[in-house]
Image (tube, rainbow, N blue to C red):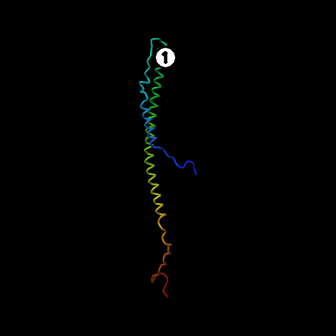
Amino acid sequence: MSAFSQISINLEQLSQNIARLQEEAATMPAIAEVRQVDGAQTEPAQDQFRGELAQIASMLAQRTLMVRKYVERNAEAFQNAAIDLQETDGADSLAARQADAFVQAIVATPPSSAPTAPAAPTAQPGAGSPAW
C-alpha cells in the first residue's frame, strides 16, 4: 500500500493564506514612494550620487510593482483553484456515492432462481419436414 493514500487540503487555511497574500500585496509601497529620493545636491558629488540613487530607486520601484502584480495574480489563482477544488470534490464525492449505492443495490439484490433452458421450438404443420 502506498504511503500516500489520500491527498487533502485545509481550504479554510488556504483561504486565510490567500487573504494574507492579498493584504501584503496591498501594503507594498507605490512606485512614486519608492522612486522618491531626497537629499542634498548642491555639490557635484552629491548630485551624481543622488542621480545614481534615483536610477536605482526607479529600478526598485519597477521590481516592486512586478512583485505586487505577481503576488496578486498568484493569490487570485490560488483562490480560483480552491473554488475549483471544492466544486470538483463535491462532484467526485457525489459520483462516488452514486457508484457505491449502485454496487450495494446489486449486491443486496437476491439472485433469481437458476435460469431455465429456452423451450424447444414447436414444429408447425406443413413447415419443415414432409409429412409421411
Instruction: Reply above or below: 97 against 48.
Output: below
Give residue 39's position: percent from left, percent from top: 44, 16
At 48% from the left and 77% from the top, the residue drawn is 119
At 47% from the left and 25% from the top, the residue drawn is 60
At 48% from the left and 70% from the top, the residue drawn is 112
| Residue 24 or residue 115, whichever sits in front | 24
Residue extending furthest toward the top: 43
Give residue 78's position: percent from left, percent from top: 45, 40
Total numbered circles: 1
Give residue 33's position: percent from left, percent from top: 42, 24
Instruction: Reply above or below: 128 against 115.
Output: below
Give residue 26's position: percent from left, percent from top: 41, 31
| Residue 102 or residue 50, whichever sits in front | 102
| Residue 64 or residue 94, whichever sits in front | 94
The secondary element bearing badge 1 is classed as helix
Report crowding for label 1: few under 14, some 14 to 19, many 20 or more residues within 10 A (C-alpha).
some
User: Label 1, on which residue?
Assistant: 49
Q: Amino acid at mark 1?
A: Phe
Residue extending furthest toward the bottom: 132
Residue extending furthest toward the right: 1
